[in-house]
Amino acid sequence: MGINKVVVERKLSKLKEFIRRIEGGEFGEEEFFENVDIQDLLVFRLMQCVEIAIDIAAHLVAAHELPMPESAKEMFLTLGKKKILSTDVAETMSNAVGFRNLAAHEYDEPEFNIKVVFRDYKSDILDLKRFAKEVVEVLEGEKKS
């Protein structure tokens, strides 16, 4: 089947735009914890990023003619096992799906800790950038080991 580079590049462009918007958010810790709208926006943008990454992963699985895994988490792990993504990025993105699931379905539950979101969001952005970089390398035909 092959990779539809136009589709993946468009999704990467959107991912980079959402990352830019997150990074452009001007708020400190105090303001973040006092303003539920800022909290909601950050969580929503991170969820959008993960959704785009899932779309890209699904495209890569299909393009490499791999059996479609039963879950989004497994898609990333499959790409890692097949050396399409590095194992580290595959595991990190698999964990990001867990965040997305928790944020989307249990946002108001005690298990969802907004303090952890604030603590981790900058490293989450770095993880998303690493994912995007590896996808670009896949598009350029470089093999991952």
Image (cartoon, grey):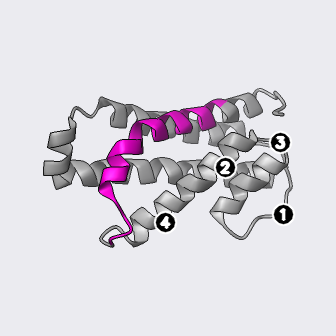
Residue 42: where, in percent of width, then height?
Answer: 32, 47
For residue 101, the mark is 4
Q: Secondary structure at mark 4?
A: helix
Distance between the alpha carbons at the discs numbered 1 and 2: 19 Å
Residue 58: where, in percent of width, then height?
Answer: 69, 55
Q: Residue at x 82, y 50 (%)?
A: 81
Dots 2, 3 in contact, CB < 8 A: no
For residue 83, the mark is 3
Q: Quadrant of residue 69?
A: bottom right
Q: Secondary structure at mark 2?
A: helix
For residue 9, the mark is none
Distance between the alpha carbons at the discs numbered 2 and 4: 16 Å
Earlier residue among tags 4 and 3: 3
Dots 4, 1 in contact, CB < 8 A: no
Residue type, label 4: Asn
Residue type, label 2: Glu
Residue 107: where, in percent of width, then height?
Answer: 34, 67
For residue 91, the mark is 2
Earlier residue among tags 2 and 3: 3
Specify start and end residues of the magenta stretch as a single range.
Answer: 110-133
Distance between the alpha carbons at the discs numbered 4 and 1: 23 Å
Q: Residues within 10 Å of mark 1 (few under 14, many from 20)?
A: few
Secondary structure mostly seen in the magenta stretch: helix
Q: Residues within 10 Å of mark 2 (few under 14, many from 20)?
A: some
For residue 67, the mark is 1
Tell me the mark number nearer the camera, choosing from 4 and 1.
Answer: 4
